[in-house]
Amino acid sequence: MNKTADIVIIGGGVIGCSIAYNLAKKGAKNIILIERKYLTSGATGRCGAGVRMQFGTETNCLLAKKSIEMFEQLEEELGYDDSIEFKQGGYLLLAYTEKMVEQFHKNLGVQHKLGIPSRWVTPAEAKEIVPHLNTQGLLGATFCGKDGHCNPFKTTDAYVKAARRLGVEIMTYTEVTKLLAKDGKITGVETNKGVIESPVVVCCAGAYSRDLAATIGIELPLHPERHQILVTEPVEMIQEPMVMSFYHGLYCQQVPHGSFVMGIGDPNEPKEFNYNSSWQFLHEMAAKVTFLLPPLANLRVVRQWAGQYDMTPDRQQILGSVPGTEGFYLAAGFSGHGFMISPMTGKLMAEYILGEETSLPIDMFDFTRFARGQLFVEPSVV
């Protein structure tokens, strides 16, 4: 199989599919999206599915705010005949140290300047929001009722169906084994099914982006990091918001059909691909979540799994072009918050690739910031 395309997109997660749709919506033609397995088989299908505006940097707050506004209208925008299960039950972010309290108030200042309806709550008020919350040691929290949950599988499906209607070709179970470039220009990709020639390649392959970029001599400061999640049996609704504690490295929410989905971060996790889920995670998760939310001790775990964050040194995404390789674009390194900003990311990348002025600035996410030593650190991530 030898083919040609005007634009090749690598990665069939929500980011790649959002970019494909937005490019096609703007009139781009002959777009091919390539996925090595099934759509959402990577980070998208393994994520915690939370969406929030409560970040600590203005750019991330705006990216998330605009994305949530798009999630609110996404079914109509994409002509989707199903539900993406968008539920705005809020996020309750817990503070356990004076340093966290100080940072949260700084975050609120940034958020309020941008019109984000977040607020500081006392431990007593936090317990009113989540009655079964254990407030032992809690100094306070922030809450935003516009934050919430969305189904990553349905969201990606909505983008895929809309993209296909606009003429995007989607190739699954097709692995890109090598990028192709000549004289400083991208020329296409080599796959396990043949070569696809194209003057534009957009890499949205998550943690696999590093190895793909290396095939044309580009060193991405990006590594995989395992994150584990579990889901419980469904029960009657008792918790509206996502509860998140940076102190415990934990998040927990009850999704619309009644199950609880929860995960924790491990700062000692090796920088390598690992899709195995461990009993140690289950033990630590159970200990932490039953301290914070005691009634959950009575729930049965249905399953647990592992996925990969594609981590960068500042835990921020890389968006845009790569100097020295004309036609090669990156949308990778999302470090765990790619799904929640995927609607706006798709729009911004389409604008950038087509040479338009972007709706929001993305220059702080450029590839060269690492070499310059100008990292863009987000203080509010798990």
Image (cartoon, rainbow, N blue to C red):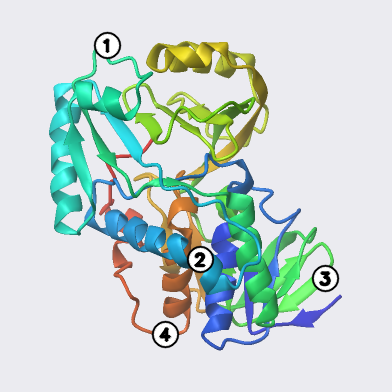
Q: Earlier in the sequence, mark 2 or mark 1?
A: 2
Place of residue 127 in the rendered image (x, y in percent of width and height, measured from the top left): 29, 22
Q: Earlier in the sequence, mark 2 or mark 3?
A: 2
Q: Residue tagged by mark 2?
A: 74
Estimate how packed mark 4 is, as few (under 14), some (14 to 19) or many (20 or more) residues with alpha carbons within 10 Å: few
The part of the image, by quadrant, that contains residue 382 is top left
In this picture, residue 198 sits left or right of residue 118? right
Between disc 2 and disc 4, the foreground one is 2
Q: Earlier in the sequence, mark 2 or mark 4?
A: 2
Q: Secondary structure at mark 3?
A: strand
* Residue 343 versus residue 31 in the image, above or below: above
Q: Residue tagged by mark 1?
A: 136
Q: Residue at x 45, y 18 (%)?
A: 289
Q: Residue tagged by mark 4?
A: 355
Q: Residue tagged by mark 3?
A: 194
* Residue 114 versus residue 291 in the image, above or below: below
Q: Nearer the viewer, residue 311 or 143?
A: 143
In this picture, residue 136 sits left or right of residue 175? left
Mark 1–mark 4 distance (CA, rounded to whole Å): 53 Å
The part of the image, by quadrant, that contains residue 66 is bottom left
Place of residue 158 in the rendered image (x, y in percent of width and height, measured from the top left): 62, 64
Estimate how packed mark 2 is, as few (under 14), some (14 to 19) or many (20 or more) residues with alpha carbons within 10 Å: many
Amino acid, disc 2: Leu
Amino acid, disc 4: Gly
The answer to whether residue 168 is visible is no
Place of residue 166 in the rendered image (x, y in percent of width and height, measured from the top left): 65, 82
